[in-house]
Amino acid sequence: MSDATDAVAEELASIAETLADLALDRLRTASESVHSGEGPDPALVAEERRITRARRSVEKAVQLLAGPASAGE
């Protein structure tokens, strides 16, 4: 990979980590509401799913930038 591609891949990996943190936060909030006797907020659960889908897409982009040489890693 070129230096520019490496930089973009690193930035995307950082974004994927941030998205994972956001999704975990949403799951924690939903879990807390269940433990307090309420049902999980459907909007919150849907948001977590959207964030997780976005994270997976970003992770795929990182893999694409890495190229076939790193597919076995």
Image (cartoon, helix red, strand yellow):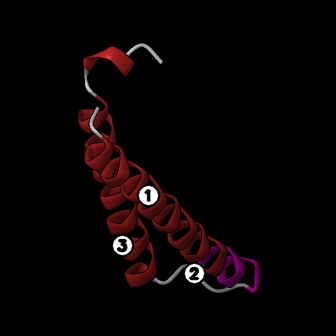
**Mark pair 3, 2: CA separation:** 14 Å
Label 3 SS? helix
Indicate left or right for 24 with 42 as reference.
right
Q: How many labels does the image show?
A: 3
Instruction: Residue 13: give x, y in percent of width and height.
Output: 44, 52
Label 1 SS? helix
Q: Which of marks 1 and 2 is in front?
A: 1
34 part of magenta stretch? yes
| For residue 50, above or below residue 9 | below
Instruction: Residue 72: give x, y in percent of width and height.
Output: 42, 13
Judge by depth and name the residue closer to the eye, 30 or 37.
Answer: 30
The residue carrying mark 3 is 46
Label 2 SS? loop
Judge by depth and name the residue closer to the eye, 5 or 40.
Answer: 5
Judge by depth and name the residue closer to the eye, 70 or 22.
Answer: 70
For the record, the magenta segment spans 30-36
The residue carrying mark 2 is 39
2 part of magenta stretch? no
| For residue 3, above or below residue 58 | above
Instruction: Residue 43: give x, y in percent of width and height.
Output: 38, 83
Name the residue: 57% across, 67% down: 21
Instruction: Pick the quarter of the image with the N terminus.
Output: top left
Numbered mark located on residue 16 in the image: 1
Q: Which of marks 3 and 2 is in front?
A: 3
Identity of the residue furthest to the front in this view: 3
* Nearest to N terminus: mark 3 or mark 2: 2
Circles 3, 2 touching at the beta carbon (< 8 Å):
no
Mark 1 closeness class: few <14, some 14–19, many ≥20 residues within 10 Å: many
**Mark pair 3, 1: CA separation:** 18 Å
Examine the image and state in which quarter residue 33 appears.
bottom right
**Mark pair 1, 2: CA separation:** 28 Å
Name the amino acid type tagged 2: Gly
